[in-house]
Amino acid sequence: MSIEDKDKIDAIGVNEEEKLVTLAITDHLDWENEYDHLIMLQEKINLYLSFLESGEIYESCPSAKDKKFEIKLFSKYDLTEKAEEFLNVAYAQIVEAGFNLSCEISGE
């Protein structure tokens, strides 16, 4: 799965020690078409938020009960300035919803 699969959760990981559930967004796309890329990212984050807020996470991953949640973007390419701005705005909204957002750049 990847950022292009806009109706699917890419991956779910559970860290029992930290009591943390990570919902991964895997992004292999470069930023050549920045606008479309940002739209895909926004749609994916909205899907993940809906998945968490609806409680559907507990149907898919019963071990998620009583844990914190994080949406984590795994990006192959460095973010553009606009992508960083977008993620900063998204971060504030996600934290307000009670979750966390982080990003990891793997590099080319």
Image: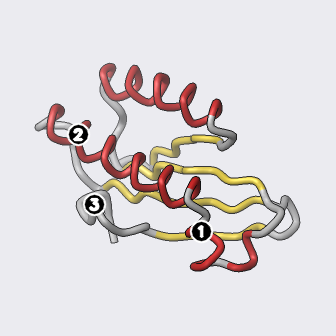
Which of the two marks, 3 or 1, is nearer to us in this view? 1
Q: Are marks 3 and 2 in contact (CB under 8 Å)?
A: no
Q: Residue at x 30, y 57 (%)?
A: 3
Location of mark 3 (residue): 6
Taking the image as shown, residue 5 lies to the left or right of residue 36, namely right
Q: Give the mark nearer the N terminus: 3 vs 2.
A: 3
Taking the image as shown, residue 68 lies to the left or right of residue 72, namely right
Which residue type carries mark 1?
A: Ile
Taking the image as shown, residue 5 lies to the left or right of residue 86, namely left
Residue farthest left in this picture: 33
Q: Position of residue 58 (x, y in %)?
A: 65, 73
Location of mark 2 (residue): 39
Residue farthest right in this picture: 17
Let me know if residue 108 appears in the view.
no
Q: Are marks 1 and 2 in contact (CB under 8 Å)?
A: no
**Spatial distance from mark 3 to mark 2, Cα to Cα?**
10 Å
Q: Mark 3 Cα within 10 Å, few/some/many (few <14, many 20+)?
A: some
